[in-house]
Every structure is written in structure tokens, then in C-alpha cells.
Amino acid sequence: MATKTKQYWLVKSEPHKYAWDALVRDGQTFWDGVRNYQARNNLQAMKKGDQVLYYHSNEGKEIVGVAKVVKESYQDPTTDDERWVVVDLAPVKKLKKPVTLEQIKQDDRLREMALVRQSRLSVMPVTEDEFHLVLDLAK
């Protein structure tokens, strides 16, 4: 029996729309509003238990916390269009120190990170090495 490989992701939210503190307050939420096929495909690939970096876009431009997938993809309840899905996320921990986009861009070890290469994508994969490097930068 093959063991499931843990995957890592990054999701973006504008703080004025749904900040990290709102996720902490709510305890869990469905990640809705994704209307990009590549981002949707990433949501569909997420598995329960996967770790997710939480990025504040536009204002702040920084990774502020770690969440986890608590429910795998299902129909987005905010639309009747069957093409769009959501996953449920729950907070794991707030980073001691946010990791800015500037820091990520300046770190050669993170130059291939999707956040740098595909900056407009709202849901993206992160490698295990990238995930742990970001956590190291947050200390």
C-alpha cells in the first residue's frame, strides 16, 4: 500500500476581503471565488491534511500563516456553475514574523517559487523545500 505524499500550497487573499485573523476567528472556511482554471485545478488536487501558506495580497504582500485542508474539493456554494469548486481550510498557526514577497524574491533558493513566477495565480503549489524555507524565514 502506497503512502500518501503530503502536498503544500499557497492561497492568496486580500486582507480587507478575508484576512488571516478572520480565518482564525471563524476557525474554518470554504475557499471560494476562484474563477481561474489553473487555480481551480490546484484546489481539486488538494487533499485533506495538506499544508497551506496563507498570503495577504495587494496590502502587505506577505505570507502570514499556515492553514490546512480539512475538506477536499466540492461544488462552490456561491455559484450554480458546476465548473467551480472550493476546499475547506482551517488555521494551523500564525507566523511569528510575516515573510514578505520582497524577502522571497531576494532569496535565490525561492526564485522558482510559483509566487514569483506566476504572481497573479490565487491558488498555487509549493514544494516541500519552499514550504520549509518560508517557515525558516518566519523565525
Image (cartoon, grey):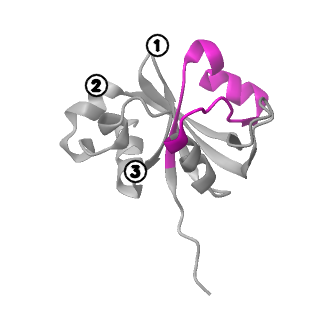
Q: Is residue 11 magenta?
A: yes
User: Tag 1 or tag 2, which sits nearer the N-term?
Assistant: 1
Image quadrant assignment for residue 36: top right
Name the residue carrying label 2. Answer: 102
Question: Mark 1: which secondary structure?
Answer: loop
Quadrant of the frame with the N terminus: bottom right
Within-10-Å neighbours for mark 1: few <14, some 14–19, many 20+: few
Direction from residue 5 to residue 19 in the image, left or right: right
What's the distance in space between the residues labelled 2 and 1, CA to CA?
Answer: 13 Å
Name the residue carrying label 1. Answer: 59
| Location of residue 106 with respect to 5 vertically, above or below | above
User: Tag 3 or tag 2, which sits nearer the N-term?
Assistant: 2
- What segment is highlighted magenta in the picture? 9-38
User: Tag 1 or tag 3, which sits nearer the N-term?
Assistant: 1
Of 118 and 111, nearer the camera is: 118
Direction from residue 65 to residue 106 in the image, left or right: left
**Which residue shows up at 31% across the image and 35% down it?**
116
**Which residue shows up at 37% across the image and 31% down it?**
119
The picture places residue 123, in percent across and down from the top left corner, at 52, 39
Quadrant of the frame with the C terminus: top left
Name the residue carrying label 3. Answer: 132
Residue type for callout 2: Glu
Within-10-Å neighbours for mark 3: few <14, some 14–19, many 20+: few
**Which residue shows up at 64% across the image and 58% down it?**
47
What's the distance in space between the residues labelled 3 and 1, CA to CA?
Answer: 24 Å
